[in-house]
């Protein structure tokens, strides 16, 4: 979602920008409860299954381009992401600051993890810093750390959802911030993107419609297994199969090679992700079905995103 700080129009793969748009739309559908009022079972598959590929895929894309950015140094990238995070936390302050002042525990949570969807920017920032710090240690260390942190995140989540422990530990394991953070989600998928960038030539053959269909089949199977064996608590943020689905999706779409120089589509995707929570917040005051809310939210957020893209020419909003 975050572009590198370069001057002049740069050749880019517009197919990846189109993928970002689709991923941003998935996030809107997830937060709005797409189809929940029409078909709860199908809604669950989308909002707690298929749509869960969106954020990890964003991280893989960011990791891919971060690898190139790190060759030029991490300073400019860190300043840009930190400024972006700070600006949007300030923009969303009217929604989180009153609660943070009234409830100290909520305030600490917002400060540590970011407000709502803005956790992604904080995870990107801190995860990127860790990637930069680990890079000199060599690729084996990167692979080991990525695998261990991903396994830890998935393990924490499954242990919580299956309620393998009792009392405060179970409550802690079931807090989304325990596993959906820079360490257990941001870092492993960023490392995945870095590794794809380093070995793209060898991995390119994985980018095909057939491989993507197989990967999505694994995701559907894992979702189905959770629905069967853990029907009381089947909501997951991180699936084991995402470690395959997200890089395969990235490689498949990147292989389409729709070339251009315009950044507008990619910026629109970022803006859509950043503004959609504010737009949906307004719709909650109006009684409507979740599917209609999704469609109205998408349309309204897209309209709001356009002036944000235009304003980004003068203010670093994207």
Image (spheres, rainbow, N blue to C red):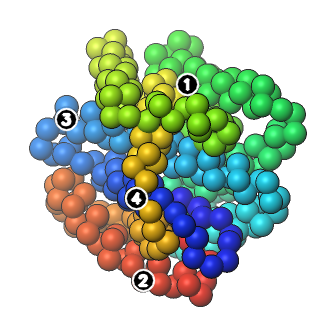
Mark 1 to mark 3 CA distance (whole Å): 24 Å
Residue assigned mark 1:
154
Q: In the rendered structure, which disc, 1 or 2, sits on the residue that comes first in sequence? A: 1
Residue name at image x 57 percent, y 76 percent: 9
68 vs 169, left or right, is right
Q: In the rendered structure, which disc, 1 or 4, sits on the residue that comes first in sequence? A: 1
Residue name at image x 35 percent, y 42 percent: 51
Taking depth in this image into account, of 46 and 160 the one nearest to the observer is 46
Mark 2 to mark 3 CA distance (whole Å): 34 Å
* Residue at the limit of the structure toward the bottom, as seen here: 314
| Tag 1–tag 3 contact (CB < 8 Å) | no
Q: In the rendered structure, which disc, 4 or 3, sits on the residue that comes first in sequence? A: 3
Residue name at image x 52 percent, y 29 percent: 243
Mark identifier at residue 258: 4
Pinpoint residue 203: horizontal percent, then vertical percent.
55, 32
User: Mark 3 packing: few (<14 Cα in 10 Å), some, or many (20+)?
Assistant: some
Q: Nearer the viewer, mark 4 or mark 2?
A: 4
| Tag 4–tag 3 contact (CB < 8 Å) | no
Q: Residue 286, located in which quarter of the rendered image?
A: bottom left
């Amino acid at each position: 979602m975050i572009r590198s700080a370069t001057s002049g129009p740069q050749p880019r793969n517009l197919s990846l920008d189109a993928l970002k748009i689709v991923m941003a739309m998935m996030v809107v559908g997830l937060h709005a409860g797409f189809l929940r009022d029409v078909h709860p079972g199908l809604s669950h598959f989308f909002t707690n299954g298929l749509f869960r590929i969106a954020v990890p895929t964003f991280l893989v894309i960011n990791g891919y381009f971060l690898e190139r950015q790190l060759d030029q140094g991490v300073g400019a990238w860190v300043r840009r992401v930190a400024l972006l995070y700070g600006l949007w936390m300030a923009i969303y302050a009217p929604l989180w600051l009153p609660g943070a002042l009234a409830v100290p525990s909520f305030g600490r949570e917002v400060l540590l993890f970011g407000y709502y969807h803005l956790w992604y920017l904080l995870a990107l920032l801190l995860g990127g810093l860790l990637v930069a710090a680990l890079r000199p240690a060599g690729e084996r260390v990167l692979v080991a750390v990525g695998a261990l942190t991903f396994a830890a995140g998935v393990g924490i989540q499954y242990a919580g959802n299956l309620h393998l422990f009792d009392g405060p530990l179970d409550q802690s394991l079931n807090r989304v911030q325990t596993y959906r953070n820079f360490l257990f989600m941001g870092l492993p998928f960023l490392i995945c993107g870095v590794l794809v960038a380093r070995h793209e030539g060898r991995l390119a053959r994985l980018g095909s419609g057939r491989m993507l269909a197989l990967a999505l089949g694994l995701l559907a199977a894992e979702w189905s297994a959770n629905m069967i064996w853990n029907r009381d608590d089947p909501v997951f943020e991180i699936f084991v199969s995402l470690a395959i689905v997200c890089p395969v999706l990235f490689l498949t779409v990147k292989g389409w090679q729709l070339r251009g120089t315009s950044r507008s589509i990619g910026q629109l995707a970022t803006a859509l992700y950043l503004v959609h929570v504010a737009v949906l917040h307004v719709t909650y005051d109006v009684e409507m079905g979740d599917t209609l809310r999704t469609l109205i939210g998408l349309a309204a957020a897209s309209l709001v995103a356009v002036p944000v893209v235009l304003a980004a020419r003068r203010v670093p909003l994207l």
